[in-house]
Image (cartoon, rainbow, N blue to C red):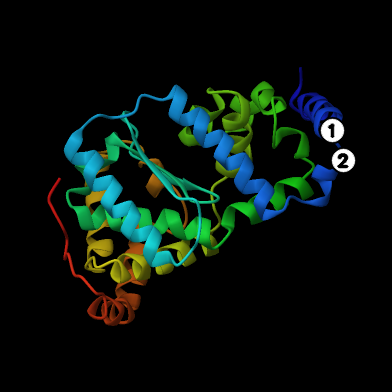
Amino acid sequence: MTYKKLLLFCLSLTLMTTGCSTLNGPSEAEINAEAAKAYNEVKSKSKISHNPEWNAMVQRVAKRIAASSGENFNWEYILIESPEVNAWCMPGGKIAVYTGIMPVLKTEGALAAVLGHEVAHATLRHGKAGYQRAIKGNMAGMLIGGAAVIGGQLLCKNSTCRTLTGLGGAAAGLAVTFFQRKYGRDDETQADKYGQIYMARAGYDPAEAIVLWDRMSAGKQGAAPPEFMSTHPSDTQRKANLRGWLSEAEQVYQQAPQKYGTGEKI
């Protein structure tokens, strides 16, 4: 089956099963409901880490970042046993951290920087915008429901999408919807800025967001960049941006009720 025929088949299948209302654009409540379904599948089909120290760190950092964002999402946080150097936040505040990223981060503060960035994508509704762009691109048939599984591996351009598509069901639909394309340069820059503010407000030294990119670069060791790094702008530009915003973030940090600095070492 050709790529074009695959898309047409999936479009017709999804329209038959979900109705044409999908083409009118989903509400935020509908998107968050789909994300919750997908997250439940991720939890049930992934190997959840039982590392007590790392789990405790992910839980406390994620809670602090979530609170600092000011969003009243139904937040959840899990640590997945996987060598992938990755973390993500689905619409509605469904967070996952992969164990593969923990040794690269080195500090609790660096984890706060990563989660601040990922949470910012959710609070700024970057995923919703991507969903709407996908619909305009005539890919509605691949966005939700079982049809996403059929062509998910062909459409996925990153490991998160491929991993979630392999789980099937709602997880596959969300994978194609929110993870098959990289965020654009403007979205990434905005998430970097807000993420640095979130971590500072949560009580973590915002300068650690700059050091994070040196560690991520060192972690490549000549291999392809981790997924977290493989988006625009370059890590050099990101560090320059974060340095430029540091003065503002430090003012926020000084006003934090509690200060943790860079936190515990990993």
- Whether residue 185 can be seen here: yes
Query: CB atoms at circles 2 and 1 under 8 Å apart?
Result: yes
**Residue for point 43% across, 53% down:** 118
Give the spatial CA distance, label 2 vs label 1.
6 Å
Query: In the image, what residue type sits under mark 2?
Result: Cys
Q: Relative to 75, is 6 above or below? A: above
Residue 198's spot in the image, x, y percent? 36, 66
Q: Which residue is mark 2?
A: 20
Q: Which residue is mark 1?
A: 15
Q: In which image quadrant can residue 101 be found?
A: top left
Residue 100's spot in the image, x, y percent? 28, 35
Q: Relative to 30, is 123 above or below? A: below
Q: Which image quarter is the N terminus in?
A: top right
In this rendering, would 141 be left or right of 87?
A: right
In this rendering, would 143 be left or right of 69?
A: right
Q: In which image quadrant can residue 43 be found?
A: top left
Q: Nearer the viewer, residue 211 or 50?
A: 50
Q: Regarding mark 2 in the picture, which secondary structure is present there?
A: helix
Residue 95's spot in the image, x, y percent? 42, 45
In this rendering, would 235 be left or right of 180?
A: left
Query: From this viewpoint, which residue is outermost toward the top?
Result: 1
Q: Residues within 10 Å of mark 1 (few under 14, many from 20)?
A: some
**Residue for point 26% across, 75% down:** 256
Q: Residues within 10 Å of mark 2 (few under 14, many from 20)?
A: few
Q: Which image quarter is the C terminus in?
A: top left
Q: Regarding mark 1 in the picture, which secondary structure is present there?
A: helix
Q: Nearer the viewer, residue 33 or 96?
A: 33
Query: In the image, what residue type sits under mark 1?
Result: Leu
